[in-house]
Amino acid sequence: MSTANITKNFSNAEQAALRLLQADIPDTERPYQEIAEQTGLTETAVLRLLQDLKEQGVVRRFGATLRHQQAGYGANAMVAWFVEQDRDLDEVGKIMAQRPEITHCYQRVNCYAWPYNLYTMVHARSREECMDVVEQLARIARVPQYDILFSRKELKKTSMAYF
């Protein structure tokens, strides 16, 4: 949930509701009612708050997060790609972002002896499967220069907290 485009001030109760919504929502039949009861709002007010933020483009989506290691996706790698300057970086990024194994795709400024300007996060069941995905992407997107940085140990993984 990004607050970059928020155009209103939130009441203390709304901030409390957003704080709860940033975490795991209650696993109950009526989770928004439970959040409402904890914050002094009504269930309708909590739902309206979320709807307003969605309409403003502040909330892009609202969904479950799968813990990929626990679901059997033990190979994770950030891939640093060098896309030549004469190529349309957005076009290459769209090609890569279409793959279901890619969860993040970012353009970044390259610097010094590090030429890479596009980064993807690849998740697969095995190291070999991850490397296969990268090799396929290199062929399809016609980006032959890349480095694969496999995750060794997860030290921290949290969602951003705004309130």
Image (cartoon, rainbow, N blue to C red):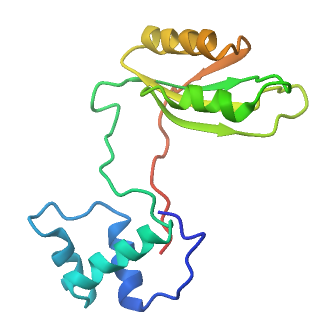
Residue 22 lies in what quarter of the image?
bottom left
Residue 59 lies in what quarter of the image?
bottom left
For residue 133, above or below residue 16: above
At 33% from the left and 46% from the top, the residue drawn is 65
What is the x, y in percent for residue 17? 33, 78
At 50% from the left and 65% from the top, the residue drawn is 57
What is the x, y in percent for residue 53? 44, 72
Count the marks.
0
Looking at the image, residue 17 sits to the left or right of residue 140; the answer is left
At 76% from the left and 32% from the top, the residue drawn is 117
> Viewer-proximal residue, 7 or 111?
7
Residue sitting farthest toward the right: 112
> Viewer-proximal residue, 41 or 74?
41
Looking at the image, residue 68 sits to the left or right of residue 93; the answer is left
For residue 120, above or below residue 9: above
For residue 98, above or below residue 104: above
Looking at the image, residue 136 sits to the left or right of residue 36; the answer is right
At 58% from the left and 26% from the top, the residue drawn is 95
Residue 159 lies in what quarter of the image?
bottom left
What is the x, y in percent for residue 32? 21, 73
